[in-house]
Image: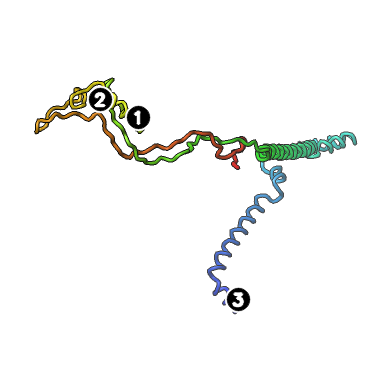
Amino acid sequence: MKKIRNFLRGHRKIILPLAAVLGVILVAITAVAVLYPFGGRASTQQGPGFEGISSVAAAEGEEKSDSGPENSNAASIGEAPGSSDTTFSADAGDQQAQTSENGRSTSGNNSSQQSSGNAGNVGNIAAHTHIWKDYVTAVTVEDEPAHSEKVTEYHMYYWDTKTWKTSENPDDFKAWEREKMEWMRTYRYENNMPPELFLGYDSNGNPTYENDHSILTYYKTIPAVTHEEQRVEYQYCSICGVRK
């Protein structure tokens, strides 16, 4: 006993709440037992104001028992609680379960068909024979690069036509020199110069003329010699766009 008391003292914080809960449970069980001593149906029939109903039910029961075995069988069949309802409920439950199973089966078939259809489409796109096409661009091809070269330019006055001519061809200048000799014999200008080229007199009183020719030498840039052509840069598949 001493050990029990010591144990209770040491675990007082746990034992007291547990005892209170157990007490509440016992009170609830006692109340249910007092209010419903014989079940819900018996207590309802024995409650106040139902004595007459009980007597009538008993009398009807006696009349049914006196009516013979056929009435007895009919009464027993009629008293089978919820027999027809139970059968209907079972059939409905089986039908509902079958419908659900069919729904799941149909859903599974649709899902598998959709998946197979998608897989087929992807396969059609992924697996194909490449159709190669050329990607062509216009390219400028340089035949001769640009460079600088020395140029001699001839500026010549023609006495007979009184015009100027410029040429880079040395043969043109040689021909002009031969013609000048003929012009000097033909025209016999004063100071052997065309009068239209007279510029005036210098500080010493000598006549001055514009030279009937000049030779200039300089360097100029000669542009590159090029041409345009079509060139294939690469080939690509017209279906998927992959290059090769």
Q: Residue at x 60, y 42 (%)?
A: 244
Q: Residue at x 60, y 76 (%)?
A: 4
Q: Quadrant of residue 69?
A: top right
Q: Residue 24: x, y in percent? A: 59, 58
Which is in the foreground here, disc 3 or disc 2? 2
- Give the quadrant of residue 48: top right
Classify residue 205 as left or right of residue 77. Answer: left
| Residue type of the residue flagged with mark 3 | Ile
* Mark 3 residue crowding within 10 angstroms, few (<14) / some (14–19) / many (20+): few
Q: CA distance from mark 1 to mark 3?
A: 145 Å
Q: Where is residue 95 drawn, in percent x and y?
A: 77, 36
Name, please, the residue furthest toward the right. Answer: 69
Neighbor class of circle 2 (other Cα within 10 Å; few <14, some 14-19, many 20+) is some
Which element is circle 1 on?
helix
What's under tag 1, amino acid-wise? Asp
Q: Is residue 232 above or below residue 189?
A: below
Asked if labels 2 and 1 touch by Cβ distance under 8 angstroms, the answer is no
What is the C-alpha distance between the residues marked 1 and 2? 19 Å
Q: In front here: 31 or 50?
A: 31
Which numbered disc covers residue 172?
1
> Are the two marked residues, 1 and 3, in contact with CB atoms closer than 8 angstroms?
no
Q: Nearer the N terminus, badge 1 or badge 2?
A: 1
Q: Position of residue 183 (x, y in %)?
A: 27, 23
Label 2 secondary element: helix
Residue in the image at 61% along x and 55% along y: 28
Task: Name the image quarter holding the N terminus.
Answer: bottom right
Counting residues from the N terminus, which is met first, the one under dot 3 or under dot 2? 3
Provide the residue designation for mark 3: 4
